[in-house]
Image (spheres, rainbow, N blue to C red):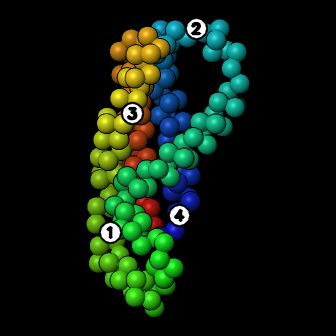
């Protein structure tokens, strides 16, 4: 299996788009600023090009991580990945893998399925991480809910795009 870079690059834009909407003052921006202790002055003193650039790079890493979560065929490939013949259909393992992918390669490959797994990732990974961080930073539960909600929506959309359109 090869990397479908256009889909990975596209999915990595999702957190920026969702963040633009989610953290807008008319949505959750004002509540987030209050819960996190941020001020308008602190926001103005930021290098936004650096913040957006690094956000995109981190989002690329998240897109790559989502491959193994939302596309189950990557699990099968990982079993054979060290075998030198896996990508050569004339070898025994290559023929087996090709036959498997021909038969099952499109199972569970929908936007809906990817969004489902992205949502689960947001709930079962992001919420505990945000909860732990908030406990030690002494942030209110609203802080956890705002950030977790953002990541649930972002991961659902990213997972949907990756699972539904990845070649």
* Quarter where residue 90 is shown: bottom left
Which comes before the other along the chain, label 4 or label 1? Answer: 4
Viewer-proximal residue among 69 and 164? 69
Q: Which mark is residue 106?
A: 1
Which comes before the other along the chain, label 3 or label 1? Answer: 1
| Residue displayed at 30% across by 51% down | 112
Label 1 neighbour load within 10 Å: few <14, some 14-19, many 20+: some
- Residue 116, given in percent of the width and then of the height, sits at 29, 46
The residue wearing badge 4 is: 3
* Horizontal relation, residue 87 to residue 123: left or right: right
Report, in whole angstroms, how far the alpha carbon at label 3 lies from the one at label 1.
28 Å
Identify the element where label 2 is drawn: loop
| Residue displayed at 51% across by 79% down | 84
Which comes before the other along the chain, label 2 or label 1? Answer: 2
The answer to whether 93 is drawn above or below residue 114 in the figure is below
Viewer-proximal residue among 17 and 15? 15
Label 4 neighbour load within 10 Å: few <14, some 14-19, many 20+: few
Circles 3 and 4: CB distance less than 8 Å? no
Identify the element where label 1 is drawn: loop
Of tags 4 and 1, the one toward the viewer is 4
Of tags 3 and 2, the one toward the viewer is 3
* Horizontal relation, residue 3 to residue 100: left or right: right
Label 2 neighbour load within 10 Å: few <14, some 14-19, many 20+: few
Identify the element where label 3 is drawn: helix
Which comes before the other along the chain, label 3 or label 4? Answer: 4
* Quarter where residue 28 is shown: top left
Circles 4 and 1: CB distance less than 8 Å? no
Q: Is residue 68 visible?
A: yes
The residue wearing badge 2 is: 39
Report, in whole angstroms, how far the alpha carbon at label 3 lies from the one at label 2.
25 Å
């Amino acid at each position: 299996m090869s990397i479908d870079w256009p889909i990975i690059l596209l999915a990595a834009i999702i957190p920026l788009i969702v963040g633009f909407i989610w953290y807008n003052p008319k949505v959750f921006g004002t509540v987030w600023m209050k819960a996190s202790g941020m001020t308008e002055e602190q926001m103005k003193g930021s290098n936004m090009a650096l913040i957006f650039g690094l956000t995109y790079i981190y989002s690329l890493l998240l897109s790559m991580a989502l491959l193994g979560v939302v596309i189950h065929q990557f699990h099968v490939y990982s079993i054979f990945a060290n075998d030198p013949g896996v990508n050569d259909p004339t070898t025994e393992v290559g023929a087996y893998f090709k036959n498997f992918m021909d038969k099952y390669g499109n199972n569970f490959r929908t936007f809906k399925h990817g969004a489902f797994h992205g949502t689960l990732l947001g709930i079962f990974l992001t919420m505990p991480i945000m909860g732990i961080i908030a406990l030690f930073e002494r942030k209110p539960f609203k802080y956890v809910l705002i950030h977790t909600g953002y990541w649930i929506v972002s991961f659902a959309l990213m997972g949907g795009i990756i699972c539904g359109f990845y070649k």
